[in-house]
Amino acid sequence: MKNTFAPVNRIPEDVLSLIPSYCDTSEELITLTHVCRGWRERFISSSSLWTFLDCTNVEQTRVYLERSKTSPLELWLGEEEDASFLNDAFLLAVPHLNRLQSLTLSGCSDDLLQLIEHFDSPAPLLEELNLTFTCPENPVIQGPLFDGNFSLRELRLSGVTTNLTWGNLSKLKTFDLRRVPSNKMSVTQLLNFFERAPLLRKLRLEDAFPTSSDAPSGRVVSLPNLEFITISAQPVHTILLNHLSIPAGAGLSQDFDLSDDKSPIPIYLPKTFKNLKHLSHITSINLSFHSGMSLRLNGPSGTHYMSGDWTGANPSQPHLGRRVLRSLTQFQLSAVERFAIAACRTSPSMKAEKSTIYQTLLPMKNIRTLTLTHCLNLPFILALNPRQDPSRTVVCPKLEDLVLYITNGAWFCIKELLAMVKERASSGAKLSTITIIGSQEFVSAKEVLKLRDHVSQVEYRLDDVVPEWDAVPSDADDAGCESDW
């Protein structure tokens, strides 16, 4: 009776059931069974608590297999200095492999590679499979494990060479493929794999795709349930994108490294954009040339995010800027409402209507907000001035808000800015607001206030912190979804 009223025995059942979730190690879970008889009976009888096996201890593996009863198992096998568990503890688990729900192999030892030979019988409960090998040469898996008899939801392969002849992918939602030599993988193999996985939602390819296509140019595979695709590639562009139909609402992220000063930047970036020109109805663009290049396109057709760094390289930034801006015109830009650009040093043309900035802004008929951060402002101001165009065309006729972040006073052209807002007002394209933010006073407030004669609201302030880029918040700031991987 005394034990019945002890505090440890008066914990509500629903609270008691949550305690094991705070255990980080097997030792902590075992400790719970030693608190009292009631706890021991309660936790030992909960078969789902004993389903994680790492096969590092023979006795522990035996106890877990007994207590897990018929519950699905999670098996994690990592490389250890002492590989004796492969011949002892793991062999105890082999007869129970049909209960596998999750399997992770990680390492490089020959003993670990030999485990693959045991995964040839059906595992109908298997939902998650992770194979990560760090060997100098990728181990080869000729066909699907477990005779293709599984219910995979997640498949992650790193450092593994396979022909991707995996069966029963009708439930697969996540596919992560990394570190596969380009000559060991073909576009056709990838496309065939994707066709067998109609529910695929998240796709990541990192240094794991071919640099040339063996598929017919007209072959396009639809991924109707795709939510996000991440590609890390050298070279920057990938011909695989020419064969994929990215659905509305899906996101695409590309990462690349341009640290080598021999990287043919001007060639690959336009090719990348050409591969993605089917993305339509882009509503916002964030572009930066600060310490490299970052580009984010947002809209109903999804999010395209590209970032690269060329630390140590010496590309001509104005030349690169012109090529990137010119390549943007391959997209459908008529729906763009916001454009944020940073560290753009593109020089103005003698004739504004022939400048790259003018050609980039011209298709943006519905842009409402333009943000320039640390940019050479003159080419933008000239492009927005109808008088600079012999045809008197009003570029960005619906532009309402102009935001300028300025650190170099020489880049602030108050005379040209006044002429531009005056001309737009007389052309029926009057700006609603102009916001000017600087780290130091580069022009008198009296001069800036002259803008109020042609603009509804003008704000001029000093701020010690001027953002590097991305001054306009993105619709998908978390679109990279790296945490999901």
Image (spheres, helix red, strand yellow):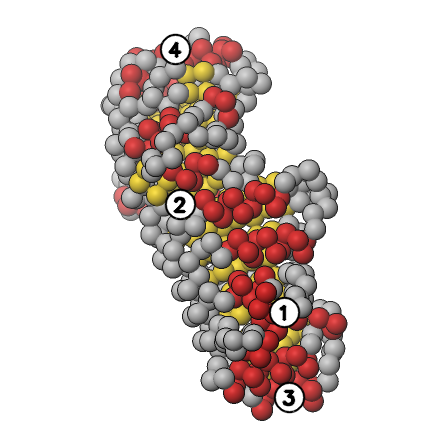
> To which residue does mark 4 refer?
117
Real-space Cα distance between discs 4 and 1?
A: 70 Å
Q: Is residue 319 left or right of residue 223?
A: right
Q: Give the number of the mark in front: 1 or 3.
A: 1
Tag 2 secondary structure: strand
> To which residue does mark 1 refer?
351
Find residue 443 and report its horizontal and vertical position in percent: 73, 81
Tell me which residue sits at (70%, 51%) in the image: 316
Which label number is shown at residue 232?
none
Find residue 425 and report its horizontal and vertical position in percent: 52, 86
Local crowd size for mark 1, using a 10 Å CA cut-off: few (<14), some (14–19), many (≥20): some
Q: Is residue 254 visible?
A: yes
| Residue nearest the observer in this picture, 482 or 410 | 410
Find residue 248 and report its horizontal and vertical position in percent: 33, 52
> To which residue does mark 2 refer?
228
Kind of residue at badge 4: Glu
Which label number is shown at residue 449?
3
Real-space Cα distance between discs 4 and 3?
A: 78 Å
Q: Give the number of the mark in front: 1 or 2.
A: 1
Real-space Cα distance between discs 3 and 2?
A: 46 Å
* Residues at circles 3 and 2 in contact by the CB criterion of under 8 Å: no
| Residue nearest the observer in this picture, 260 or 50 | 260
Local crowd size for mark 4, using a 10 Å CA cut-off: few (<14), some (14–19), many (≥20): few
| Residue nearest the observer in this picture, 39 or 444 | 444
